[in-house]
Amino acid sequence: MSALRIAFNSLNQHKLRKLCLMTQSTAYKLIRKRKMETKKYRELLNRKATKRNMVLAQNAVADPSDELPSEGKIWKATKHKDVSRSIHFFLWMMVHDSYKIGRYCDKISGSEQQGVCEKCGVTESMDHIMTKCTEPGQEQVWGLASDLWKLKTGAELPKPTTAQIMACAAIKRRDAGTTRLFRILVSESAFLVWRLRNERVINKENPTSARAIHNRWLKLINNRLGLDRAMTNEHKYGKRAVKKTLVLKTWCKVLKNEDDLPKDWTRETEVLVGIG
Ligand SMILES: [Zn+2]
């Protein structure tokens, strides 16, 4: 039995319904506060679904000829410093298969509708939300990520699998710069897809327009670029600072009017990615 079901079972039916109606983030904050720090909770999470996702994530990292990375490496990757702090918990929950989507909500009275994707008519799963749903969101977001990746590498970015999303911070690309950009692009894009789904399904908002999705994705990536520029300041951030050479390697080839920028553009104020 999942840890969340156990957590839910400790509440009465009235509270269960209330939980399914409140926003996903509020619900999880509540459950996290109540249960996450107990030993029992941690033991309960060590279950079949987690093991299955862990094996998928391990295989997403390794080449067929390589040895699988350790479980510890995958857990560490979910809270990698190149991944935004707000996304750490999302990746951790993904590996644990602990978001109450699809089959979870089917079993809670009054929330059956949340188990099925209204547009596609199939039971929701993280795989459906992240890579298959025809509601505005995933297709466009991964297309934008691929456009930027093409500027960087000359090749399109194949849509990541849920296993690759879970393990994105442990996956190596050809060099340090592309590896880091991959982590940023995949984690930020996946989390945007998740939020777009929650706004529609949980908060009952209208589907987001293509223009708004485009602008939100661009703003997220430009914010990460801006944060990177700021974090090169060793005087201000000390040990937490990011090496300037790594920041330059991460974003080279994907900047707007890059030829007009100085070699070290980290002190420039107007630096944006080259997708309008
Ligand atoms: Zn769908």
Image: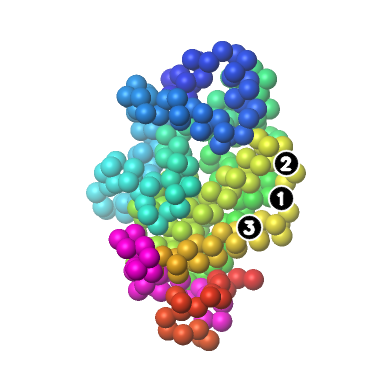
Q: Is 232 placed above or below 31 here?
A: below
C-beta proximity under 8 Å, tags 2 and 1: yes
Q: On the rendered structure, is 204 left or right of 47?
A: right
Q: Residues within 10 Å of mark 3 (few under 14, many from 20)?
A: some
C-beta proximity under 8 Å, tags 3 and 1: yes
Residue labelled with disc 3? 216
Residue 86: percent from left, percent from top: 48, 47
Residue labelled with disc 1? 208
User: Residue, x 62% and y 53% (percent of image)?
Assistant: 139
Residue 72: percent from left, percent from top: 28, 42
Main SS of the magenta part reads helix
Residue labelled with disc 2? 205
| Of 69 and 204, the residue lying toward us | 204
User: Residue, x 39% and y 42% (percent of image)?
Assistant: 56
Task: Identify residue type, mark 1.
Answer: Thr
User: Residue, x 48% and y 42% (percent of image)?
Assistant: 90
Task: Identify residue type, mark 2.
Answer: Glu
Distance between the alpha carbons at the discs numbered 3 and 1: 10 Å
Instruction: Check residue 64 in the rendering and tell me which mark sits there, or answer none.
Output: none
Q: Secondary structure at mark 1?
A: loop
Q: Is 208 placed above or below 269 here?
A: above
Q: On the rendered structure, is 37 left or right of 31?
A: left
Q: Secondary structure at mark 3?
A: helix
